[in-house]
Amino acid sequence: MASVQHQLGRRIRLAVAGAVVLTALTAATASASMPSAEGARAQQSAGLAPGTAARPDHGGGGTDTRSGARSQFPGFVLDRGRYTTFDVPGATAGVTPTGINDFGQVVGKYDTGTSASGPGASEHGFLRDRRGRVTRIDVPGARSTATSRINDRGQIAGVYSQNTGRVGDDPNRRGFMLDHGKLIRIDYPGAMETQAFGLNNLGQVVGEYQDATGFHAFRWDKGRFTTIDAPGAAGTGGTSALGLNDRGDVVGIYGTDPTGKPGTEHGFLLHNGVFTPFDAPGALLTLAFDVNDRGQIVLTGIGSTPAGPVFHGFVLRDGAKGAFTPVDVPGAPSTTAAGINNLGQITGGYAPAATGSSPSPTGMQPMSMGLGR
């Protein structure tokens, strides 16, 4: 068990924390669909023109992404106790849902390459409307794009790389926001990397940046940065902000050990200047992904088994000091929960039972909003 914990610590330390996701090894081809009118409106609002910042996918086969999923690690939306699973057309090596707005629109990333990382990776952002229609999103000039959040105004936050096919493989990746036809680059001054994770309806963004002292969280508001460091956060362990609501509450993860030792990385809520830490039941690492305006927090806990890491989603419906309600797709050995809207709808990813009781570390990669570090 000690060696497993050591491996877990190396793979899912805070330096690869953020919104934990499932990266697929394989994905079935899915039916192509042009963006719906709803998707087109969101696309226009975010400034996504077909053939430039975004374009519709064209796949093959007959998977109905509105009612089911066939890939090894699909996505899901949980609404009033009902799980709807889905794939992204054209995905071959990964589907990662990370955010959902009050219109039921989901964003995330997927991979159309031959591998989940390295030279064979080819990542794109996506927007899935509530009918299940998908629009591909690519930052112009970028080699890879991952979208992390979408607000009710259609603004979209995310991270891109100009150097690698997988965003998380680039040590110099950069954040962005798409806003009504305008691409806004979010780069913390002097930072080696900047990642934009959370986005609220006021257009405020939270995320993380890396400098010579380690990882720090930030809040970005109309071009101005404010650094956020959790009390007791240690250097390379640091702090990462993953979500925020319209009230200004921020959630994320921080580490108290610079080596990322299992059990030293915790979720947090920042409310009115007060940090409240919390840990998911049985987890060695807790990642607080998102918080809605009702104060409900969605998170994922990562535990250890002899076969490798195991993931379980949770929601804190009564805030950071409330009870942990499991978010686990029925029959799935592992589930991550990454985004929540004001209706209480949750999105994330899962490992179907057919993949086995414990997904391999290669097939199931924990990463910052699906990006990794």
Image (cartoon, rainbow, N blue to C red):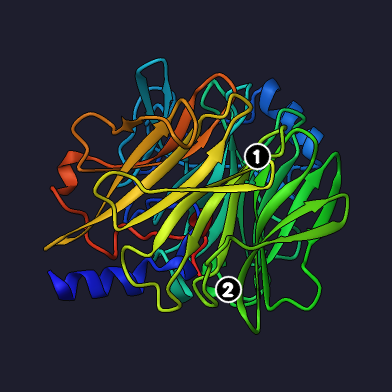
Q: Element at badge 2?
A: loop
Tell me where residue 218 appears, x and y as whole percent: 70, 59
Q: Residue at x 54, y 59 (%)?
A: 123
- Image quadrant assignment for residue 83: top left
- Which residue is label 2 attached to? 164
Q: Residue at x 20, y 43 (%)?
A: 333
Residue closer to the observer: 32 or 245:
245
Q: Amino acid at mark 1?
A: Asp
Residue 33, above or below 263: above
- Image quadrant assignment for residue 361: bottom left
**One can see residue 335 in this view:** yes
Q: Element at badge 1?
A: loop
Question: What label sits on residue 332 in the rendered view?
Answer: none
Residue extending furthest toward the top: 80
Residue 196, above or below 37: below
Question: What label sits on residue 249 in the rendered view?
Answer: 1
Tell me where residue 54 appears, x and y as whole percent: 70, 46
Residue 199 falls left or right of residue 283: right
Disc 2 packing (10 Å; few <14; some 14–19; many ≥20)? many
Residue 98 falls left or right of residue 73: right
Quadrant containing the N terminus in the rendered view: bottom left
Considering only order in the chain, which callout, 2 or 1, is on the residue closer to the N terminus? 2
Q: Residue at x 83, y 54 (%)?
A: 184
Tell me where residue 264 appears, x and y as whole percent: 37, 65
Foreground: disc 1 or disc 2: 1
Disc 1 + disc 2, Cβ < 8 Å = no
**One can see residue 76 in this view:** no
Residue 334 falls left or right of residue 319: left
Disc 1 packing (10 Å; few <14; some 14–19; many ≥20)? some
C-alpha distance separating marks 1 and 2 = 33 Å
Q: Residue at x 76, y 59 (%)?
A: 140
Q: Amino acid at mark 2?
A: Thr
